[in-house]
Amino acid sequence: MTKIVKSNISTRIVNNKIKSYGGDLDTTKFRPNQIPVETPDGVIVVFTLPESEQYVSGKLWVFKDGIKQTKNVDYTETSSSTFTFTTAPDADETVIIDYIKS
């Protein structure tokens, strides 16, 4: 029997696959609600994934104070383990990322 779970963001988990963010994602590699290594201070623009992990290109989602940021407008994917904000987040702002581990 396949277990299907629905949440308030219309995410469905079927056989360890998440049907969200426009496709199937392997739940063993999906890293939600992660905090980058760097702490926002109004100066730093380059942020690094935690635990030296790397993400799959195009599978990084960045949130600042809970608001999803727009790729290539608010931030760019700099390397497989870093991303760069267009404008440095202030010290009182929270940066959270979701990504697929490569």
Image (cartoon, rainbow, N blue to C red):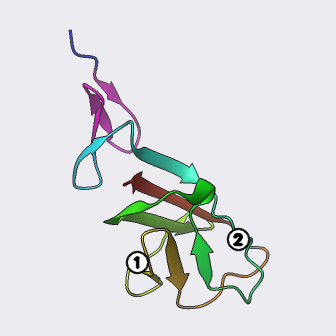
The answer to whether residue 39 is magenta is no
Q: Which mark is residue 38?
A: 2
Q: Which mark is residue 52?
A: none
Please report contact status of discs 2 and 1: CB closer than 8 Å, yes or no: no
User: What kind of residue is marked 1?
Assistant: Thr
Tally the marks.
2
Q: Which residues are magenta?
A: 4-18
Residue most extreme to the top: 1
Write the residue at 47% across / 84% down. Answer: 74
User: How many C-alpha atoms fall within 10 Å of the one at disc 2: few (<14), some, or many (≥20)?
Assistant: some
User: What kind of residue is marked 2?
Assistant: Glu
Write the residue at 53% across / 83% down. Answer: 84
Write the residue at 25% across / 25% down. Answer: 15
Q: Compare residues 46 and 21 and report the one nearer the observer.
A: 46
Q: Compare residues 52 and 27 and report the one nearer the observer.
A: 52
Per the model, the C-alpha gap separating discs 2 and 1 is 20 Å
The answer to whether residue 8 is magenta is yes
- Name the side, left or right, on which 17 lies relative to 8: left
Asked which secondary structure carries label 1, the reply is loop
Q: Compare residues 21 and 101 and report the one nearer the observer.
A: 101
Q: Where, quadrant-wise, is the C terminus in this rendering?
A: bottom left
* Residue 51 x %, y %: 61, 54
Figure check: 4 above or below 43: above
Determine which quarter of the picture holds residue 59: bottom left
Q: Which mark is residue 70?
A: 1
* Residue 22 x %, y %: 22, 55
Asked which secondary structure carries label 2, the reply is loop
